[in-house]
Image (cartoon, rainbow, N blue to C red):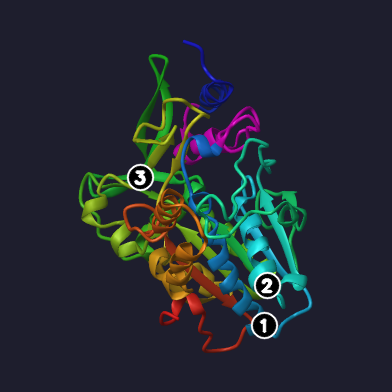
Amino acid sequence: MLRSAVDEEIRDLIQKHGRITFARFMQACLYSRRGGFYASSAQSISAHFGTSSMSHPVFGALIARQLEQMWHLLGDPSVFHVIEVGSGEGTLARSIVHACSRMAPGLAPALYYVAADYEPRTPRSSDPTVDRDNGTGGMSSSPDATLRVQRVKAEGLQAFRNVVGCILSNELIDNFPVHRFAIQGGSVKEVFVTLAGGKLVEVLDEPSSARIEERIASLGLSLPEGYRGEVNLGLEDWTRQISSALERGFVLTIDYGQQAVDLYGPEKAQGTLVCYHRHAAREDPYQDIGQQDITCDVDFTSLMRLGERHGLATAGYIPQSQFLTNLGFSSFLDALDTQGLSAARTALGRMAMMALVNPEEYGDLKVFAQAKGCGPAIELLGFASPG
């Protein structure tokens, strides 16, 4: 069988070290320079899964509305940075910048948008241009918007300092490598990846880091025998990076996940890990290595606690459906009927927009806001009553 370069890399690691943590395995699968899923320029992410920003540009327009309020709350600074980490092909960046130029004339000249990614991807020439004639309600992605987005190669936020504005991520943290664990004999055991009979297999042993058990204990979890789950230790370094980078402003995190009481509940007794290959969800991370996405739900309880510890106050936590509704989603939906589109185009636009608030599609993503240096009693529009 022909193996991918990443598969061979993982086998070499195991032969050298005897076994590796699942986190090390996942890191290679997604980010290896030898062809990891997110590090390969030949990989078309949209061929494997969709995101809110891909569904409809109104997603970026509503976030732009929230960013405009953040800018006002900071006192209308002459430079307002938006650092989007994990920007991919820049779809969200372009829709936000274009929306600001149309809807927020005060913010637009102050906006300095940086699209940062592990391996920035240039938009493909075959990508469709969205405009008022294809059912998007006039929210187009204009070439001018692309020119106002600075694209940088960055694995995190280490290179950023003195940011005044907003650090934004959309479906990023669910791709952080995780340690997998199982409850065996009443204690926590870690899942390791090794080779047996030429195949990648899992074995259980004592945790590679005391932080795994410490995280589980800190959440007050009492897990039954046989329970399997994941712990994202990368949240700690991520939170430190945000705190170091952000001088004053906000953090807006949009991702799949839950608070710990639900994330580690009985219905999640086998964990939340899922893979995506050509828009099909699957459970086996040991196939198509380097050619499929691997993702786990985010533990928002730990993210909140770590943030508070590093000076990031929780400013809101809400499902995406409610966040977008509060920002005026219905007004954009109603505007479809005024665009002069054909019935078919209007129906297409409506379907794409409704996917953003449908709990069975993107509506159940969580939107989490944090604030630093903004004073007490901050109320953000997306987390307030509908308006």
Dot 1 amino acid type? Leu
User: Quadrant of the rendered structure where residue 246 is?
Assistant: bottom right
Q: Tell me the element at label 1.
A: loop
Q: Nearer the viewer, mark 2 or mark 3?
A: 2
Q: Which residues are magenta?
A: 18-44
Decide: few, some or many residues near mark 2? Use Cα within 10 Å; few <14, some 14-19, many ≥20.
many
The answer to whether marks 1 and 2 mark residues whose Cβ atoms lie closer than 8 Å is yes
Badge 3 local density, few (<14 within 10 Å), some, or many (20+)? Answer: many
Residue 291 appears in the figure: yes
Name the outermost residue toward the bottom: 376
3 or 1: tag closer to the N-terminus? 1
Tell me, for residue 23, which label it has, or none: none
Alpha carbon separation for disc pair 2 and 3:
37 Å
Reply yes or no: does residue 143 show up in magenta.
no
Separation (CA) of disc 1 from disc 2: 8 Å
Is residue 27 visible in this depiction of the protein? no
Amino acid on which disc 3 is placed: Phe
Callout 3: helix, strand or loop? strand
The structure residue drawn at horizontal position 61% and vertical position 33%, both measured from the top left corner, is 32
Query: Which numbered disc, 1 or 2, marks the residue that appears first in the sequence?
Result: 1
Q: Nearer the viewer, residue 245 or 53?
A: 53
Which residue position is annotated with label 1? 74
At x 63%, y 29%, the residue is 42
Give me the C-alpha separation between circle 3 and circle 1. 42 Å
Viewer-side residue, 244 vs 99: 99
Q: Position of residue 137 (x, y in %)?
A: 52, 60
Instruction: Give the residue drawn at x 64%, y 27%.
Output: 34
Mark 2 sits on what residue? Answer: 165
Q: Nearer the viewer, mark 3 or mark 1?
A: 1
Residue 28 on the magenta span: yes
Disc 3 marks which residue? 181
